[in-house]
Image: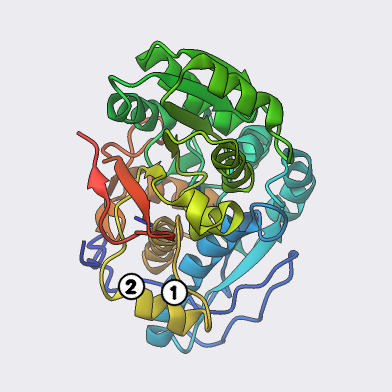
Amino acid sequence: MTGTKKIASAFAVAGIAALALSACGTTGGSNSSAGGGSSSSGGSCGHYEIGYLGALTGPNGALGQNMLGGINVALADYNAKHADCKVTVKSFDSQGDPDQATKLASNITSDPKIVGLIGPGFSGESKATGKIFFTAGLPSISPSATEVDLTQQGWTTWHRVIGNDSAQGAADAKYLSGKKVFVIDDASVYGKGLADVVRKGLKPVGNDEVQTGQTDFSATVTKVKGSGANAVFYGGYYAESGLLVKQLRQAGWNGLFMSGDGSEDPAFVKVAGPQAATGAVLSAPAGPAPADFGAKYTAANPGKTAGLYSTQSYDAANIFLAGIDAGDTTPSKMNDFVNQYSGTGVSGPIKFDSKGDIESTTIYAYSVKNGKLDTTNPAPIK
């Protein structure tokens, strides 16, 4: 995740004009009040909410903050045009933990004001809660959960606006072709899933598994150095990948370090340190944000800058807002609206297949140069 990623287009669905939400995102399940009056579509104001479920604190909280920030941009746009009937976001901080997400799921499904859910943010929590939201009939759009099997569960309410690990892992393997690659994963649903796809596309010189929350990677570093590898691929998140590359560099290993979208965030550089991070390649199934998005993001989220999954969350929010404007505010009607949706968002073309996967995606390679993650000039992996 962390996480990036075309000029913003208006979503031309059901005659909808521009869409978006307000910078009123809150954490811990609290929410701000909605405005009164009538909506511009002619219906009565429903005081609707869009839910967000994902990590806002904890070791990978930066990724969730990027997502909530994108939702805030969409709400700011939308509420500026619907001052008499604003939509708000109600956020639930899972810290990316499946158990915590499961506990929060009942709070989400019992709130009649929530017309759609953005999230869950991570694959593990998505797998843990998908059936709950499906049973409740609540449509969800994840901006970031990429594990392949999530759309193979028969959950007709589950969607994602990002390419899955099958596409990303195959591209990563292609990028590493010709190198002696050592593959490592963090044993999570996401990290292992992505790393396994990379393994299938290569003949690794070695493999290893670590754990989320681990800080000492000396045993893995020893295995990498002993394998003769000149490249490492890590499936997991920036909290661990940053420490891993730091310790590899400290041990004198100078090969290519590559990880996926869970590491593609400036927080990776912060954890690793600028010197150790320089030269790393971080892939993501999302292109860079349009030129004007950064300014809009900071206006809606003072003091913050857009990151990985911000544009995907913005697009997901706009889909739900389009459904609200179309009057499809019951769970079943909103889910039908999402299933049939077709448009161009700031993250790219959006159309869902019958299982909830986005129909097309491009994988990009982002590089750390001179101690900074270059989020504006990624190279498409072809």
The reply to whether callout 2 and callout 1 are in contact (CB within 8 Å) is: yes
* Residue 183 vs residue 348, the one in the foreground: 183
Residue 135 visible in the shown view: no
Q: Position of residue 69 (x, y in %)?
A: 51, 69
Q: Nearer the viewer, mark 2 or mark 1?
A: 2
- Mark 1 Cα within 10 Å, few/some/many (few <14, many 20+)? many
Task: Using residue 74 as the reference point, say whether residue 347 is left or right of it.
Answer: left
Colour mode?
Answer: rainbow
Q: Secondary structure at mark 2?
A: helix
Lower sequence index among marks 2 and 1: 1
Disc 2 and disc 1: Cα gap in Å? 9 Å
Rendered image: mark on residue 73: 1
Mark number displayed over residue 338:
none
Q: Is residue 3 above or below residue 206?
A: below
Look at 41% across and 36% down and name the residue there.
Answer: 356
Kindly identify the amino acid type of the residue bearing the numbered disc 2: Phe
Q: Would you identify the image quadrant in which residue 218 lies?
A: top right
- The residue that mark 2 highlights is 293
